[in-house]
Image (cartoon, rainbow, N blue to C red):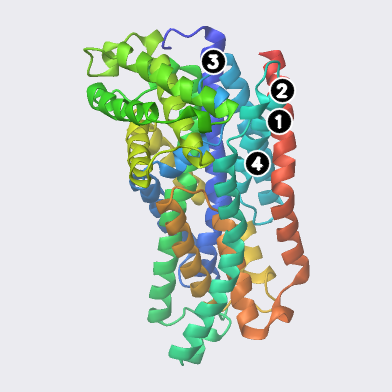
Amino acid sequence: MFGLPTALAILLIVCILLACFFEFINGFHDTANAVATVIYTNSMKPTVAVIYSGVLNFSGVVLGGIAVAMGIVNLLPMDALVDSNPYHGVAMILALLISAIIWNFGTWYLGIPSSSSHTIIGSILGIGLAFYFLPGDLGASAVNWDKAKDTGLALLLSPLLGFSVAIIVMFVFKRFIKNEIIYKEPIPGKVPPIWIRMLLWATCGLVSFFHGQNDGQKGVGLVMMILIAILPGYFAVDASVNLQEMNGNINKIEMLMSKVDTTNLSKREKKMHADILIHSLHFEKEIAGKFSSNEITVNDRFSLRKDIVKITKGSEKLINGGNLNLSANEIKDLGKEIKAGKKLIEYAPTWVILMISVCLGLGTMVGWKRIVKTVGEKIGKQHMSYAQGASAEIVASIGIGLASWKGLPVSTTHMLSSGIAGSMVAKKGLKNLQKKTVKTIALAWVLTLPVTIILSGGLFLLFRAIL
């Protein structure tokens, strides 16, 4: 297989199967939140609901682009992104996937709505922090803190926004919809009026689609990590990108960086600036007279990836440092060229997207009952009404859709369960929440990061020592 040694080929297969299994678990773990409302309110039969949600999850992954996938990849340390040793990549992937699967499966088994996004982010941060314990001066670049900050903020704000906006939506419902049926608990076995069903079908569909667009991309990002780590020569760069057009972007970055007065830069920034210019020259030399990476030897393709990573990531760090003596327009132009330059390395083959889509879609159709019961019955003291289900899903679909547009991973679980809590509070205040369930969900939310950080970091160091 691709000329790999037998042991490495087996590890490649194991890693891809684990990534597929993670996405399968993600399907029945997170998507249960989306189908909870239509199943619990008798708006759809369970079998129809999970198939409907599964198809829309599949569509969300296929049509959603890869911005979130690359956001996940970019949380990794720069040293991991440019490390051409496949066994180091295997150690990283195995640690990340095993720790994420253990936590996701455990919380599902206990029926606790927990975030797959939180889980995967914690696992990646654990690997980054584990770099501090490796030989060499890797600690300074161990975690992409700028990206981690943006991601952490999105994960922190999502439940707060879900809770507060759901309260507002419930008040809007009460102001404009006077039909009392929508505010009553579903009668077991009785189908609600068609207009209520259509509303819940639409909101469930939106949450499912945006879940695929956001959470599904995380699986795409994981598979790309595996392929780049183990088969860098074949998947390090996108062969469909015109290298000469890319050279134009790199030339503009180089030109703008040449105008920078380095006396304003810190020692670390000066090194980054020098690296950008070195890798720009190397890139130009490597692609001279070539239009596709297929014209470059397999062994040299990873060096192109390393050039782009060093140039784009280094330039972003210098911009964020605020010490570049460039005009506002020049900074803006630099940002555009960085974004264009990333096209060579930020991609995913169609077969990867389809594979993850299938895994997520199939996972949606399995194991949903535990989470549905928690969402429908155990967050509030009263069972969820039609209006509460619709308001929570409206909030979740908008929140997840906006996060996907911005390329930020966000938690479907946090958005929806906090939306349900907000809709319960809108009806009878905080006393309408079941404290035990809310505490359990909050505890899982608090513990996810530290547990997955410790677990993945420890596994990473263990696998690095073994492999």
Of labels 4 and 1, earlier in sequence is: 4
Pointer 1: what residue? 457
Q: Find residue 394 and report its horizontal and vertical position in percent.
A: 46, 69
**SS for tag 3?**
helix
Instruction: Identify the residue at horizontal 52%, vertical 68% (top origin).
Output: 37
Q: Residue at 31% of width from left, 11% of height from top?
A: 285
Q: Residue beneath label 2, please?
A: 461
Q: Secondary structure at mark 4?
A: helix
User: Could you tell me if the residues under marks 3 and 2 are in contact, i.e. CB atoms within 8 Å?
Assistant: no
Residue type pointed to by label 4: Gly
Q: Amino acid at mark 3?
A: Pro
Is there CB contact under 8 Å for labels 2 and 1? yes
Q: CA distance from mark 2 to mark 1?
A: 6 Å
Question: Which corner quadrant of the image does residue 303 belong to?
Answer: top left
Marks 3 and 2, the one that precedes in the sequence: 3
Q: Is residue 97 above or below residue 425?
A: above
Looking at the rendered structure, the kind of residue marked 1 is Gly
> What's the mark number on residue 122?
4
The percent coordinates of residue 217 (x first, y second) are 45, 42
Q: Give the position of the C terminus as an image quadrant.
A: top right
